[in-house]
């Protein structure tokens, strides 16, 4: 296949073009340009009313994946870093991704923990020798059964014993609508993470309506076992109806109450979520420490191939430039039992 660039644009494009050959990849990309323009027009028209609605299937889904998901992967990475997920001890074993769509959060999670699992050298063991507390050479230990630094007896554990395993619980309103795209994204993200000794292969999918309190109740057992719950980029599809937003706020509070002490709840959304996050700060502050941030998320730039054949102006489609950045709002709840521990930070 044509060199499509590295993560995240490379992952996004490989997910849409898993069966596309070099001969027709250019034509396939150009065929997505009208869908990209329709997406941009719909988002621009609906942004002010918070009533964005689109049928995320077929070419619309593929155009969305290439044009938007790379930036949303970076947004999720930002959210996880603000939540200090890599510093969480012990590491999270079960992560819930709500309103998951094509799962950019899973790609970000794999990237985050792949970095934490990387070894100092390809021939150095990632754990210290219990005798000298140094990192021994794997090749020497395998050949001699001894630490290369101090000579103490040393056995190399099978690789999968040192893997970080994270179970993924995916929640979405219409799990089947994103399925072809999501399956490819997960396949690539799981494979990349596996090479860095991070196992994301245990995945469960749940139908979940964030507007419906019965959805929260139906999945209460799963939610109660989560170490991390993340909700990203759903508020622009709720509309402005006060009763709907009130129901969503109440359901988010219910999810937070189900989470056990020591877990984290992360809300990661776009610029218009500031008022909702302000209201949610009040609702959630009795359940733990609440922090909020407003940050600019910088997007990776697509390579020349994508710019020429997907984003660039053609006679049949108006010019649609790649996005360079977007503003995002983040809210973090560190769940505790202490009702007096709630506080807001910036």
Image (spheres, rainbow, N blue to C red):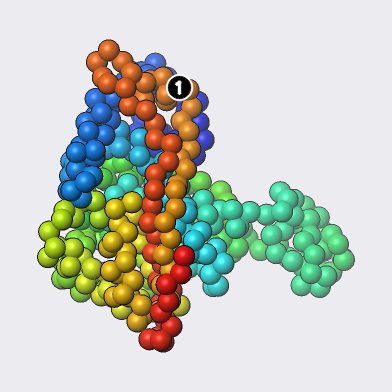
Tell me which corner region of the image, top left, top right, bottom left or bottom right, holds residue 280.
bottom left
Indicate left or right for 127 with 342 as reference.
right
Q: Nearer the viewer, residue 123 or 247?
A: 247
Say what secondary structure mark 1 lies in: helix
Nearer-the-camera pick, 67 or 141: 67
Q: Nearer the viewer, residue 282 or 135?
A: 282
On the image, the x and y values in percent for residue 342 come to 41, 79
Residue 59 visible in this rendered orientation of the protein: no
Residue 37 location in percent, x, y?
Answer: 25, 28
- In front: 124, or 89? 89
- 159 over 12 or under it: above or below: below
- Name the image quarter holding residue 47: top left
- Disc 1: which residue: 305
Would residue 267 be found to the left or right of residue 300 on screen?
Answer: left
Q: Is residue 37 visible?
A: yes
- Name the residue located 51 percent from the left edge and 59 percent from the top edge: 81
């Amino acid at each position: 296949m044509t060199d499509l660039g590295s993560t995240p644009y490379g992952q996004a494009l490989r997910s849409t073009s898993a069966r596309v050959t070099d001969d027709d990849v250019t034509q396939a990309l150009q065929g997505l340009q009208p869908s990209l323009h329709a997406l941009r027009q719909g988002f621009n028209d609906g942004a002010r009313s918070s009533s964005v609605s689109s049928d995320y299937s077929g070419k619309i889904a593929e155009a969305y994946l290439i044009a938007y998901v790379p930036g949303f992967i970076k947004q999720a990475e930002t959210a996880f870093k603000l939540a200090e997920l890599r510093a969480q001890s012990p590491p999270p074993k079960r992560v819930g991704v709500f309103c998951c769509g094509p799962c950019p959060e899973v790609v970000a999670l794999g990237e985050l923990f792949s970095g934490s699992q990387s070894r100092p050298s390809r021939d150095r063991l990632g754990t210290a020798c219990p005798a000298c507390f140094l990192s021994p050479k794997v090749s020497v230990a395998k050949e001699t059964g001894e630490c290369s630094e101090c000579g103490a007896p040393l056995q190399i554990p099978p690789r999968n014993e040192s893997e970080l395993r994270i179970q993924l619980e995916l929640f979405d309103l219409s799990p089947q609508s994103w399925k072809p795209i999501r399956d490819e994204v997960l396949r690539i993200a799981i494979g990349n993470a596996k090479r860095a000794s991070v196992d994301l292969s245990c995945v469960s999918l749940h139908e979940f309506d964030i507007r419906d309190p019965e959805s929260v109740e139906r999945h209460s057992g799963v939610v109660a076992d989560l170490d991390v719950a993340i909700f990203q980029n759903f508020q622009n599809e709720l509309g402005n109806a006060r009763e709907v937003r009130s129901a969503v706020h109440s359901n988010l509070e219910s999810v937070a109450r189900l989470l056990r002490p020591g877990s984290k709840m992360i809300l990661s959304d776009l610029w218009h979520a500031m008022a909702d996050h302000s209201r949610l700060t009040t609702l959630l502050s009795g359940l733990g420490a609440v922090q909020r941030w407003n940050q600019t998320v910088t997007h990776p730039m697509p390579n020349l191939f994508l710019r020429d054949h997907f984003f660039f102006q053609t006679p049949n489609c108006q010019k649609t430039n790649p996005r360079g950045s977007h503003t995002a709002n983040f809210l973090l709840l560190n769940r505790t039992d202490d009702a007096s521990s709630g506080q807001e930070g910036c």
